[in-house]
Amino acid sequence: MINYIELAKEINEEIIQNRREIHKFPETGFELDRTLEFIETRLRDYGVEPIRVGRAGISATVGREGKTILLRADMDALPMKEETDLLFKSENDFCHSCGHDAHTAMLLGAARLLKENEDSLNGTVKLMFQPAEELLAGAMDMIEAGILENPKVDAAVAMHIYVGNELSRTGTISYSRGPALFSGDAIKIHVKGKNAHGSTPDKGIDAISIAAHIVIALQQIIAREVPTDDQAVVIVGKISGGDTVNTLAGNAELEVSVRATTEKMREYLKKRVKEISESVAVTFGGKAEVEFWYGMGPLFNDLALTDEIIGYCKEVIGEDNLNQIPIAVGTEDFTSIAAKVPGVMINLGVGSVEEGYSLSIHNPGMILNEEALHIGAALHAHIATRYLIDK
Ligand SMILES: [Zn+2]
Ligand SMILES: [Zn+2]
């Protein structure tokens, strides 16, 4: 078996330079022109032919006919200004505080390693560089454009950086077996009442008062309806309405976020938010229109595939560097892929609190230990190679 850690060490500098190049010029959503061009140039340098998939995705394959394993990296940054002292700090108003620059650099590293050892591949490795992860939209766009077909994908693996906690020591892998991430749904509730002058409240229907009753009533879902051995979240994150101090508000709007660990509980929460909002509004003579704004289901790491992938990780980094962790609250666009083919998401430690990395992802000051990146590239390459041998 090829020692990918050794080979990845030899291209360590290049992986780090690729990451810094992407880090300096972050782009968001589907607007990734510069990033896409950079990735395509690098892939061609490595002898791998990229193709555009969907609005702003890149796919490439390495290997030969046989089973196909997909490795996913995301490319988009966040619309926030970086707050670090890095020499290669972002030069615009966006920031790679979710580490997607690292994901892309690691997958580029893996592309080179796999291409240089293509003869050892017993099937196809499909590389997927996806846009708009933060918008929870890029994966579906690429799926609709056929990323899971031609060749048909048999299994999918995504690696996310893990930083700023006790378990995220450099070079470790943390993973969940089965339920891995909560679902997340955003819901808008438009409350319709009737304007009236404050001196004649009986002539109007107070949308603000109705909205307040809805806020209280929604708390009942978690307090009384979710079993104690299940976990769920319902919050009202935003409320607005009314025009002026002495007028009854004709309209109010609530923004509600719900999270669940299973698809069943997710559907239940959405159903109850709708029922409660509508009936509370009716009780007070108004109306509530419930709009399911956007959402993502819970991520479930395929059990058999997780065991296989973690077994391959162990061959590279050893048992002591593997941590099984409980389900995490958060959503990931990879869920769209794992809903269609067996999928696993693993977390690569890129700096723990003890190592001096105290900030987590989505913090504009987040920094990571770049010495982890070649390990991530080696893991990608080893996982793909081993999976194809076993299939
Ligand atoms: Zn993120
Ligand atoms: Zn991310």
Image: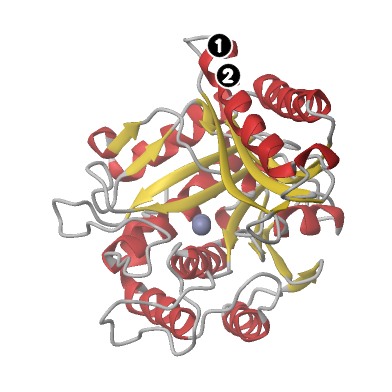
Which residue bears the numbered disc 1?
224
Residue 122 image offset from top left, x and y in percent: 63, 47
Count the marks: 2
Q: Amino acid at mark 1?
A: Arg
Residue 193 occupies quadrant = top right
CB contact under 8 Å: marks 1 and 2: yes
Is 126 placed left or right of 38 in the picture? right
Question: Amino acid under label 2?
Answer: Gln
- State the mark number for residue 220: 2
At mark 2, the secondary structure is helix
Residue 342 coordinates in the image, percent (x, y): 67, 34
How far apart are the two marked residues, 1 and 2, measured between alpha carbons?
6 Å
Q: Residues within 10 Å of mark 2 (few under 14, many from 20)?
A: few
Instruction: Tell me what residue is drawn at x 22 percent, y 43 percent.
Output: 166
Check disc 1: other Cα within 10 Å, few if <14, some if 14-19, many if 20+.
few
Q: Identify whether 303 is placed above or below 124.
A: above
